[in-house]
Image (cartoon, helix red, strand yellow):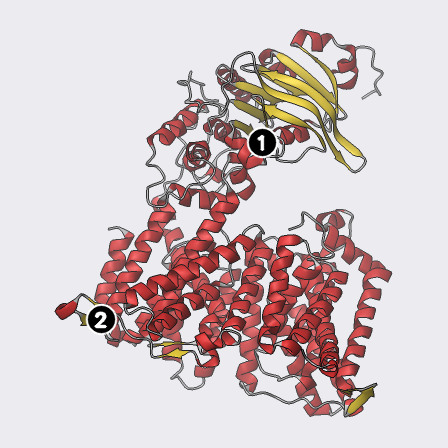
Amino acid sequence: MTPELSLAVVLVVLPFILPHIGGTFDMMERILDWGLLGLGFDLLFGWTGLLSFGQAAFFGTGGFVTAYVLLNNVIGSVWVALAIGMIAAGLFGVVVGWLAVRRIGIYFAMITLAFGQMAFFLENNPLSNYTGGENGLPGVPVPWLGWGDFAMRLEPGLPMYGMLAVVFLIGFFIARRVTNSPFGAVLRAIKENTPRAAMLGHDVPRYKLAVFVIAALYAGLAGGLLGVLQSYMPPDAFDLDTSGQLVVQTIIGGVGTLIGPLVGAGVWLWLRDNLQSIPGVGALWNLILGLVFVLLVIALRRGICGEIRHWWQRRRMTEPAPADDSAAPVVQSAPMMVMTAPLVRATLEAPALEITQLSKHYGGLRAVDHVSFTVRTGSVHAVIGPNGAGKSTLFKMLLDEIHPTEGHVRLFGRQITGLGATRTAQRGIAKSNQLNTLFLDLSARENMRIAALARRRGSFRLDVLRRADSIPDVERQVETALATVGLTERASLPAHVLAYGEKRRLEIGMALATGPNVLLLDEPLAGMSPAERISTRALIREIGRDRTLLVVEHDMDAIFELAEKITVLYEGRLLAEGDPDDIQRNQAVQDAYLGGMHDVHEPA
Amino acid sequence: MPSIPLLLSQAFNGLALGSLLALVSSGLTIILGTLGVLNFAHGALFMLGAYAIFLAMQATGSFILSVLVGCLFMLVVGVLVERAVVRLFYQRPPEDQILVTFGVGIVLVEAVRALFGGNSQRVPVPSWGEGVTQLGFLIYPTYRLEVIGIIAVTLAVLWLVLYRTSIGLVVRAGIEDQRMVGVLGINVRRTFLLVFGIGVVAAGFAGMIYAPIIAVVPDMGDSFLVESFVVIVIGGLGSFPGAVVGGLIAGEIVSVTSAFNSAYAEVMLYAVMALLLVVRPQGLFGTEGRV
């Protein structure tokens, strides 16, 4: 029984039981309208983590544009007018979204709030000739269904309810497709760990803008329908209260459930209609709901539907077997991973990475100081040095995560300095971080999939209608990556449940899953037990057979075993370069880092 | 083209509104900068101040005494809200902080509405503020001039506290880097409580001072909330000078625009904000990269 079907059943049954539970058709229509508005909002907030306090701007825009074109006989058909209103709201969403999505959390909430207010003021005054100002637009006609002799007016009551129920069901169906699509998977990744999503190669601002516009479209349709269902378009559609009420209802019903806003609206409107008649309590119902809201945010953050879903999932999930750290997995010789071809034809002679005079200064501190070296295609190249030598900073510049103060980096002959992390990642270079940056609430497989989707689909794609796991190439890459790092049995578990060593392997696996030609490993063995180190070294050796590896490590045994060439950094500068034998014998390297025989030490 | 006297009087109105916004926004910005919490209840606190002075005036009849009592009341409210609610959210994501302060705002507004109803209450102008003052060829209500003066003094006191006391130094350091301040051994929690209290009292005090010249209704704080957000975006998040300068600029934008076309007064403010977000997102005094 899919959610869509369950919902359809409920909506069909509802008219028959309404009078017995203190409900009316009008109330149900409004609840469905709020639910529709909430579908878009939940995609925005529940899935992508963007808290907007300005949805009223699009709700009102859709509503007033729809009402205006109908009342001024620009368009005769209510359906077409609704579509026009929706598009108008969407266009407004593009403008506001473009300004808002480049900013995070707090700024985003403030900007959406401000634009909501601006729309309110525009409606009230300068545009009052079109919008009726404080009076709104009365007399919005009801839609007709069918043609000619078979046309049926959708009167208020059962027909109108039926229309709204159908519209909501369609909206719900589409929203669910979006959440199950690759697009939706990326949205979730953005919510979980925005920087990581960007680093994998997803164009985060475009995704945010896309979902913002989708939410605006839903809002615009809901606004238009409001005018239709009550034959009147009220000015308070633009009110801050409208945006606020939407937020409160969604929290009550449950964020991230899609059905939450509908349930929350049901609770709110049912309570309002039924509490107001109780003497003494009536006037206080807003206050009571406000207190309930605060309590929910403090204690039951998931809301009604969210808590139900959480409880349901806990019942279904059997306790996973605890990870057996001591028995490190045997690294099977994984089938060669599909490598997406580099954008530039790479020959064995051309260097994978050319680093030229790379520097990063923070004021007077020279974290990296005029470092130059070359990484040969297909080699395993190590970068070593004491803590604070500038290794991690160097790595960040190789991906253009941070911009160098001086110098540049070339990947297969093309400059990547200045492109930004997302576009650089799309060129076929990936990094596994020193500190795990996983999508903790997603399963290991889903983590891998987000990584694999990045280069397969490019930095942005609006593929909202297909399922996330429906691209065969991507699924093959995901399973291969899982097998290579030995996580196939544990792949369905949420990442936060995994043991530390497993998380480390997932971190490496994700970088691998993007299908890079150059892989940067920042202290891959950090924090691992001796047994784990052995298997991970084998893993690195395995990975290094088919692609270029650049490894930062403190584990010297691993380095001397794996690396063909070693670059030594010290205090931001390049100290020495050579093969493992050269480096071991190098006096300067011994003094700075490896330790020599003639050092005078304090007695322990 | 509006006349010179009209423009001038609007400029003064802009100063009055601007100083009000400056005070309200200062409270908001130091709470945001120090605690990292965007206080969505700030407008409701402004409203609470206005109602506090309404009650106190009815009880005592003395404006100055009412203000003192009102400030004490706001301090108690601030401490209660911080200890009972806000304190639980310091480690939680910013969206949750926004949601809970938003909820607190709703509760405060609805509580006031339940107690006083939705009708506008009147707070009389104090005796020393009655009448008008002659300023060259401009005749201006005396109380509004005094409001500008009172708020200027208040902001100066705030400035002194922030920039000339050691507690102020801790607050400003905390705005720069919250964790570092804690690591240095300073009682961060106590500082948070103090800053929240100051912010709340500032908002409430603004409400008290402005009550005689504004309609005192439960949702009077809504527009000030949004406008103070715009102000701190213009001035720079967490910046006290930014809040003051931004507030004055905002007040002038709204008032002077309304001299030309009152319909666009508010809209102009948001348009300026939008422009700033494109050109200089960190605001006038904000630090780049903290967006």
* Residue under pointer 2: A159
Mark 1 closeness class: few <14, some 14–19, many ≥20 residues within 10 Å: many
Q: Chain of mark 1?
A: A
Q: Residue A589 placed where, x, y %? A: 75, 15
Q: Is residue B202 visible?
A: no
Which residue corresponds to the image point at 47% horizontal and 22% vertical from the top-left?
Answer: A327
For badge 1, the amino acid type reads Asn
Image quarter hosting the C terminus of chain A: top right
Describe residue A210's horizontal placement relative to residue B130 as left or right: left
| Rendering quarter of residue B65 | bottom right
- B180, above or below B239, in the image: above
**Which of A100/A559 is in front?**
A100
Hey, what amino acid is under mark 2? Answer: Pro
Check disc 2: other Cα within 10 Å, few if <14, some if 14-19, many if 20+: some
Determine the residue positioned at 65% across, 16% down. Answer: A556
> Which quadrant would residue B87 be assigned to in this image?
bottom right
Q: Chain of mark 2?
A: A
In the current view of this chain or complex, which residue is farthest to the left? A149
Observer-nearest of B150 and B118: B150
Q: Mark 2 or mark 1: which is in front? A: 2
Q: How far apart are the two marked residues, 2 and 1, measured between alpha carbons?
A: 58 Å
Instruction: Report the number of discs.
Output: 2
* Residue A394 location (% of width, % of height): 67, 28
Specify whether residue A415 is in view.
Answer: yes
**In this rendering, position of residue B154 left or right of residue A263:** right
Q: Is residue A307 above or below residue A550?
A: below
Q: Are marks 2 and 1 on the same chain?
A: yes
Above or below, comparing residue A335 to residue A405 in the picture: above
Q: Nearer the viewer, residue A433 or A274?
A: A433
Circle 1 sits on which residue? A433
Q: Secondary structure at mark 2?
A: helix
